[in-house]
Amino acid sequence: MNIFSNLLAAPAKPKPRPTVKKKQRRGIEIKSQREIEIMRQSCKIVATVLKEISQIVKPGMTTADLDAYAEKRIREMGATPSFKGYHGFPGSICACINNEVVHGIPSKKKVIRVGDVLKVDTGAYYQEFHGDSCITIGVVEVAPEAAKLIRVAEEAMYKGIEQVKAGAYLLDLAGAIQDHVEANGFRVVEEFTGHGVGRNLHEEPSVFNSRTKSLPNVKLRAGMTLAIEPILNAGSRFTRILSDKWTAVTVDNSLSAQFEHTVLVTNTGYEILTDRSQIRC
């Protein structure tokens, strides 16, 4: 999800989850090999949908069009949308444009235009496990500052992912992300964090994107699965929630960008489970 806001870390409105009536598990879960194989499939579904959306999106489409496409494709691949119905969220994707930061509700009134910075976040629930990922798309041709923001957001995600291995700590990820973002003149949105993901869309631990003493600095263990998802603003790092009770926007109307991957911690490093480069479309 989203980055999507994390139920475990912040008081902000959480990212949607499916209407699956299962008891929420608590604590950090270490996945078995069987569970990891299932997550590879749920994450492959998410990666496929996002790659396809990146190829079909064009000016004149609405975010509702993308939502309908995502739900159709997720269900065709044998999964259900993780976000739809999550705490009442109405969509299968979160779609945010320009100054919208996270949790944007898909709408027929939100028309995509040339130059837009479009964030698409989605999840798939397959055989009782979730995959979760987000991309930011520069629609056709964006302004140089917008292009830089998108590039740095993706780079920052990978800077964090590169720190992942058994024995590393969450602050290793957070520091790498924050340093890269700030070196390029942008700000990390601190209200929203990454999270564990698996049987639940949001699990422990909270995966923060900047240095903090307010959240546990968890030591990573092989078999953990994390949604690593930095959000960057071009201006102020602060956000506000619109009247729809979901959509967060920048307080100064500046642009925002976000990337997210579901990542498996291994003894020697990591595996990106939502890797779109492995998808043939």
Image (cartoon, rainbow, N blue to C red):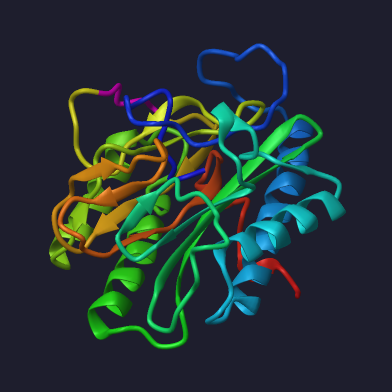
Q: Is residue 218 magenta?
A: yes
> In terms of image quadrants, where is residue 113?
bottom left
On the image, the x and y values in percent for residue 152 come to: 30, 68
Horizontal and vertical percent position of residue 244? 41, 40
In the rendered image, the vertical position of residue 106 relative to residue 109, given as above or below: above
Whether residue 223 can be seen here: no
**Residue at 51% over, 20% down:** 28
Residue nearest the observer in this picture, 52 or 157: 52
Q: Is residue 270 left or right of residue 255?
A: right
User: x, y percentage for residue 71?
Assistant: 73, 52
Q: Is residue 240 above or below residue 159?
A: above
Residue depicted at x 40% and y 88%: 141
Q: Is residue 170 magenta?
A: no
Q: Residue at x 52, y 82 (%)?
A: 59
> Can you see residue 52?
yes
Identify the residue at the far bottom of this view.
Answer: 141
* Residue 236 placement: quadrant: bottom left
Q: Who's the residue at 36% across and 38% down the image?
A: 193
Quarter-of-image position of residue 171: top left
Q: Nearer the viewer, residue 63 or 147?
A: 63
What is the chief secondary structure element of the magenta stretch? Answer: loop
For the C terminus, the image quarter is bottom right
Observer-nearest residue: 268 or 6? 6
The span picked out in magenta is 215-219
